[in-house]
Image (spheres, rainbow, N blue to C red):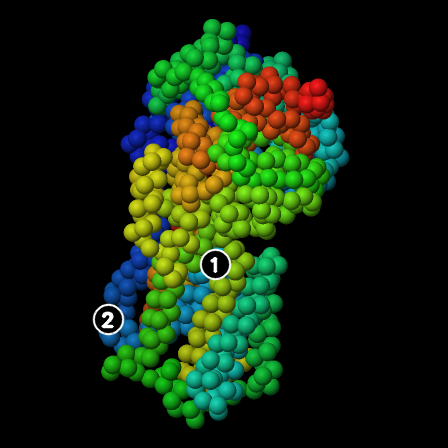
Amino acid sequence: MQQEYLLEMRGIDKAFTGVKALTKVDFSVKRGEVHALMGENGAGKSTLIKVLTGIYHKDAGTIIFDGQEIAPKTALAAQALGISTIYQELNLVPFQTVYENIYMGREPRTKVGTIDRRRMIRDARQVLEGMGIAIDVQEPLRRYSTAIQQMVAIARALTINAKLVVMDEPTSSLDAKEVQVLFDVIRRLKAQGIAIIFISHRLSEIFEICERVTVLRNGELAGVFDIEELDTQTLVNSMLGRSFTNAQRSKGGYAYDEAEELARLEGISWNVRLNGIGVDIKKGEILGLAGLLGSGRTELCNILFGSEPPDDGSIFWLDQPGDIRNPRDAIRLGMGYCTEDRKVEGLFLHLSVKDNLTMAMLPQLTKKGVVQKKKQDAIVQQYIDRLKIKTPSSEQLVRYLSGGNQQKVLLARWMCMNPKLIILDEPTRGIDVGAKAEIEALIQEFSANGISVLMISSEMEELVRNCDRIVVMRDGKKLGELTDERITMDDIMDTISHGASAILLAKEGEQA
Amino acid sequence: MSTGPVNPVSLERPPLSDTLRKQSPVIMLGTLLLINAIFTNNFFTIDIVWLIIIQCATIILTGMGQTMVIATGGIDISIGSQMALAAVVCANMLPYGILPAIIAAIIACAVMGLISGFMVGKLHVSPMVVTLSMLLFARGVAQVINDGRILYIDQYKNFEFLGQGKILGELPMQIIPIVLVVALVYFIIEKTAWGRRIQAVGDNPTAARLTGINATGTVISAYVLSAMFAAMAGLVLVSKVGAADGSNMGRLAELDAIAAVAVGGTSMAGGRAKVMGTLLGAIVMQLITITVVMNNIQYEYAQILKSAIIIFAVFIQRESRA
């Protein structure tokens, strides 16, 4: 008889040079269930998963998988047992084809020992079709969206005959539609009896797809819940260990019509991504860009910041034609840009917190090219204190900081420049709930101080909570604008799905 | 969540291996000195210090430029040829005076560095390919200027003082360019915005651009400086030898320079420049040779030992995977 539980981890202890990362953690997953593992950053989720997948070795406790006690020494050993992990940053080779990625490292052979490409192609296609994905497996992986790449990673896990698939923030770079595709795949896997450990910061997803939830806090088990008997409040409380009320929309009353204009983009076209879009930004407002992945939000920000020259269209800054040919020009005008991917486009991982924080400000901190250390130190300390950046010292390399603190360093990089406009692309992605609230508070503070904020978020709740006005985009065009009481999730969704008709209605309304 | 810290301890302080890694050039130098203290007769004499200064000069000078280039995420394998070019230009210009000869040599190499830097920084051609071509080009130009012959300059005694003279008693002249260049590069890397930018561009070019840094200019500046320091190394060498040989001078000098940088702890992937590390690295490389020679071991063994040390240095400094 098969046991009810596919995986039982009992009393897991793990310490790093004396610091406890996990204390007597119990964690169990039933066969064919989708189990959410939740907790703030540093709660021990990563460590627990790494113990399970053989990257770390536990100090104490037992792991029983499929009826047998296991102690995987390497990720490969865990994989051989049937435990596959899909990481947030995908371990795939973008320049190789889809099928090569699926079978990498264990290519099937022909009789003479060469790689059996025909079989790989056939099988890869089959696996993907089984997941409901029909793509050309002979194309290089990079041709496809992040979502599809994720599916390929899952297909790879499936071909290893995984019994348990760990998904570490699989939805963080997917848009709403792609998330649904992923969830369909997850449901199919479930139907095949494969268990899934699902890690996500997005609560709504947990409620949609998961059956049970295990919450960790400070390296200890904080609770195990069935999803039916769980509400958001309880879950968040359990994660934070303190009472936490959902941030309500406190905005409103922004005198939109009286506000002066700061920047205006007119008829911007770029590549096929932007098609004659026009957007204006007022002084001190928080303008949100809503839309699905690929709607052109990031591209619009890149163009405003001078990172990409537009094919067509013009930018006005304080009603003057803005001559923005590169980011330097944009910074000179008073812009700051926190990009979507902190590590790839924002941080200097090998440099210190201090250098990262002051990199844009260096021209103001130097006298005849020499950095004025006292002035630099003072500014860095000021922002470490003000933003509560958790770092042992300003000399700490930025890569040792947590995601939330890294994001704060990037915000500080632009805050110290006294900007007029801060562009934030997914400012709270991959950040724990506590730091998220702090960053949202900062965004409000910017606007209170007269700094305009242009903000992209794929979490619509975040836009609803924070924005004075929301521009909804699709296919590089503006579908509509929402202000005041029209800023709701429903209105955003409606505008995205019925964009064209909404614009028509608005025009008719004006004429009437 | 995986954007967070790997484990709680990393929040507090970098792991112990980081400290070890940082001190590795010092440890290697210490080990070498210890070995010599035990095995080499007459090692701890002042003459050895003078010898090290004289023999290290070219490695240190070229290593300093290499440190900057590697910190931008590039590499300059043309510096040996640049040394030869500087030597030949200088030798041919000496009839017009020492100062014009020196300036001409440095300018000639700076132009070569400008070309390399432009190709890498502006046109985004692979640094390895660009400087490999430059290695051939500069060597070729040096040979053409000299028509393949060796040009003797032993009649210019004042110039030879540069490479053979002593100051303050026994101190070799080479100490002057060494101190000047090391101090200059240390100052640039540690104290100036320029130095921060060099490392920022090497660490993350995209982020650098989005932070308003002129990445192209920064990269070009590193290659120009590297070429100019190589020119100085060429001048020191030609004045020591007393003859300019366009075909053979500076051959494989790039290897010593790169090795010194690697041993010194500068990240080969760019983004982290260790000026004093390179200085120690250069001394370590030269000390190996001296140790081997003074113990009557065949020179070829020095090369084997050097290769092991380089691999070891790069091994312990490799990025621990997060």
- What residue is at 31 percent from the left and 56 percent from the top? B27
Q: Is residue B74 above or below residue B180?
A: above
- What residue is at 46 percent from the left and 37 percent from the top? A451
- Hey, what amino acid is under mark 2? Phe
**Disc 2: which chain?**
B
Can residue A473 be seen by looking at this rendering? yes
Residue A96 circle label:
none
Helix, strand or loop status at disc 2: loop
**Can you give x and y, in whole percent of width and height, for residue A120 in the image?**
71, 33
Give A498 or B14, whichever is nearer the viewer.
A498
Q: Earlier in the sequence, mark 1 or mark 2?
A: 2
**Does residue A141 appear left or right of residue B41 in this picture?**
right
Quadrant of residue B180 within the rendered picture? bottom left
Quadrant (top left/top right/bottom left/bottom right) for the C terminus of chain B: top left
Can residue A85 be seen by looking at this rendering? no
Q: Are marks 1 and 2 on the same chain?
A: yes
**Can you give x and y, in whole percent of width and height, for residue A364 in the image?**
40, 53
Mark 1 or 2, closer to the camera: 1
Residue B44 circle label:
2
- What residue is at 73 percent from the left and 27 percent from the top? A134
Q: Is residue A476 above or below residue B60?
A: above
**Can you give x and y, in whole percent of width and height, for residue B226 in the image?**
47, 67
- Hey, what amino acid is under mark 1? Ile
Residue at the disc numbered 1:
B70
Give B1 or A60, whichever is nearer the viewer.
B1
**Can you give x and y, in whole percent of width and height, for residue A390 in the image?**
34, 35
